[in-house]
Image: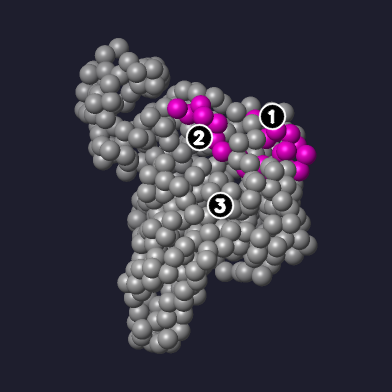
Amino acid sequence: MLMTDLIAKKRDGEELTTEEIRFLIDCYVSGKIADYQMSALCMAILFRGMSDRETLDLTMAMMHSGDVVDLSPIRGVKGDKHSTGGVGDKTSLILCPMVAACGLRIAKMSGRGLGHTGGTLDKLESFPGYNIAIGEKRFIDNVNRIGIAIMGQTANIVPADKKLYALRDVTGTVASIPLIVSSIMSKKLAAGADVIVLDVKCGSGAFMKTEEDAYKLANGLTRIGKLAGKKCAAVITDMDQPLGCAVGNALEVKEAISVLRGETKGDLLELCLTLGSCLLVGAGIAEDKEKAEAMLREAVDSGAALRKLAEMVEAQDGRAEDVYDTSRLPEAPVKLEVPSEVSGYMRHIECEKIGLISMHLGGGRATKDSQIDLSVGLVLHKKVGDRVEKGESLATIHASTEEKAREAAELLRACCSFSDEPVQRPTFIKAIIQ
């Protein structure tokens, strides 16, 4: 096969065969196809698209480009969750212990944050000693013993995606739905779960800015998951403002624990109940959404979900007592309130910029090699639709220095806009795609 022929074929809107797609991925990973040729193909895919069969073939070829995790030694049904990324997204820290307390096995491999979005591994490392590199055997043993483990991806999981995403990032081809679907689903399938729920974020703080694009992505993800033989559902959720109130690693852990204690309700709990219901129904543990939600609420009310988080932290070299006493988690030396300069109703929060404020405070990475400060970030006191009085605090900045705190406060004020008239709160759960 000649790469030039395959580029021309896709350029002209024709479908690539299964064998051609396997050839492309195998040769690209081995270095036999140059970056400039693969970037031309990605641009052709961006404009011409791919059929479901092509997208599935691409997903499976990428999945088999490296290690595929064998979870067969784990007893019972295994579940997994993926989020397309957003600001303040600490969902895994709440959802995974909740569903594990209901009997679903959670064997999850997660990633770190980059840019304005946070990473589950960084948040978990807010627990002193938490080990994200426990190895596959211990990972499986922990899931069999306590029902839950979250660790970093192994180095050779879907190497094709690592190489291809880096290329797409610098060639303007990230936005292709088939390429996004194959990127996400190749990693989820390689991780070995039986039931998968996908949290597709939509809005100014998400990669998918419009509901239309979010629907396209969610439908593509679920179709490919089902074609690959998995129970798969997607939930489209609002990311026009941060999820919950805390943005920043240790701060988000504290908020997640507050939800597991039953102290914090709102959008975070709503999301975890929705995602958790999809997992429990898909796994056959609950008959329907209502019974699943009742099980999940009981896991919180009884303390079982919080105990499951403590068990996981302890099983991965952290201290269970840090789950029960969050004052032991990293704390920033400077805390600064941000008083509102006007009265009115919160009309809009520039979500992505809120994430960037946390990053500039030191709570996120500008590059993959950036060192992060787990203690810094911000906690919002007002969200869209809330009444605000002049002088009332919009947020608390947690910073390493007074200067950084003051800079963040000015940036935060610029992110908020107000209305004299009441503002309707946005619909949080946009759609559930089974």
- Sooner in the amino-acid sequence: mark 1 or mark 2: 1
Which of pointers 1 and 2 indicates the residue nearer the eye? 1
Picture coordinates of residue 124 (x, y %)? 59, 50
| Residue for point 21% across, 23% down | 8
Q: Nearer the viewer, residue 280 or 288?
A: 280
Q: On screen, 290 above or below 232?
A: below
Amino acid marked by disc 1? Lys
Q: On screen, 217 above or below 185?
A: below
Q: Which residue is mark 1?
A: 137
Circle 3 SS class? helix
The reply to whether residue 92 is visible in this rendering is: no
| Residue for point 68% across, 42% down | 316
- The quarter of the displayed image where residue 424 is located: bottom left
Q: CA distance from mark 3 to mark 2?
A: 21 Å
Residue numbers of the magenta segment: 136-159
- Sooner in the amino-acid sequence: mark 1 or mark 3: 3
| Residue for point 46% across, 39% down | 184
In the image, 111: left or right of 6? Answer: right
| Residue for point 63% across, 41% down | 131
Q: Which residue is mark 2?
A: 187
- Sooner in the amino-acid sequence: mark 3 or mark 2: 3
